Image (cartoon, rainbow, N blue to C red):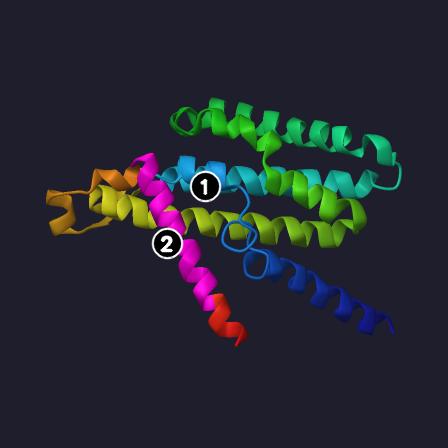
Amino acid sequence: MNQLKETTTGKKFWVEFAKGIIITNPVFVLVLGLCPTLAVTSSIDNALGMGAGVIFVLLGSNIIISLIRKITPAMVRIPVFIVVIATFVTILSLVFEAYIPPLYESLGIYLALIVVNCIILGRAEAFAQKSSVLYSIADALGIGIGFTISLLIVSFFREILGTGSLSVFGFTLFSIPVLSETPMAFFIMPPGAFLVLGLLLALFRWLGVLKNE
C-alpha cells in the first residue's frame, strides 16, 4: 500500500511538473508575463537571468505559501502572498546586485517588477494555496522552467536576427555571416519583440490546433 502511494505521488509530481512546461506554459499557452518577455528578450543573457530569477521566486513563494495556507485568513491572503513574494524578490535583487552587477543593470526595473508578475501571483492563488508543498514545488519548477524556455526561444530569434550572432555571457556560440554584415536591428527593438512573439504565439496555437484534431 505504501509503495503504491509513493508511486502515485511520484507520478503526480512529474505530471504537475510537465504541465507547467507544456500544457500550461505561461507565455505560449496562458499568455501571461508578456511584459518581461517583451522587455528582456533582446539577448540570451537577459533571458537566462530573468528565467533564473523567476524560478527562484516561484519556488520560494510557492513553498512558503503552501506551508502557511491553512493559517492564512482568506480576507488577507493576497496581501500575505505579495509580502512573501516581495521578500524573495528583494533577496534576488540584492544577490544580483552584489554578484552579477552587469546583469542586474541590464534587467533593470523588470527584476523588481517580479513582485507583481501575474505568473507568480497567479500560481500562488490558483495552486500553492490549495496544494501540498511537494506538488507546489513541482508546479513552481514546471512553470518556472516553462517561462525560461519561452524567454530563450524568443531571445534566440531576436538576437540572431538583430545581431547576426548568438552569444552567452561574452562567449560567441556562432554567427551567421550574412546577418552579421547587415543585421536587422529592428528585431532587438520593442517592435521586433512584438513581431517575434506574435509569430511564435501563432505558430504554437496552430500546432496546438493540429494536435487536437
Query: Is residue 66 in view?
Result: yes
Q: Quadrant of residue 45?
A: top left
The disc, 2 or 1, on the residue closer to the chain's N-terminal end is: 1
> In this picture, is 205 found above or below 144?
below
- From mark 2 to mark 1, how far is it between C-alphas? 14 Å
The residue lying at 80 percent from left, 34 percent from top is: 77
Q: Quadrant of residue 73?
A: top right
Q: Which region of the structure is painted magenta? A: 189-207
Residue 206 sits inside the magenta stretch? yes
Front of the two marks 2 and 1: 2
Residue 47 sits inside the magenta stretch? no
Label 2: state its secondary structure: helix
Asked whether, in this view, residue 63 is left or right of residue 55, the answer is right
Question: Alpha-carbon neighbours of circle 2 within 10 Å: few (<14), some, or many (≥20)?
Answer: few
The residue lying at 41 percent from left, 30 percent from top is: 103
The secondary structure making up most of the magenta span is helix
Name the residue that disc number 1 marks: 37
Question: Alpha-carbon neighbours of circle 1 within 10 Å: few (<14), some, or many (≥20)?
Answer: many
Viewer-nearest residue: 70 or 38:
38
Label 1: state its secondary structure: helix
Can you give x and y, in whole percent of width and height, for residue 53 in the image? 53, 37
Tag 1: residue type? Thr
Which disc, if any, is residue 199? 2
Query: Is residue 72 in view?
Result: no
Which disc, if any, is residue 142? none
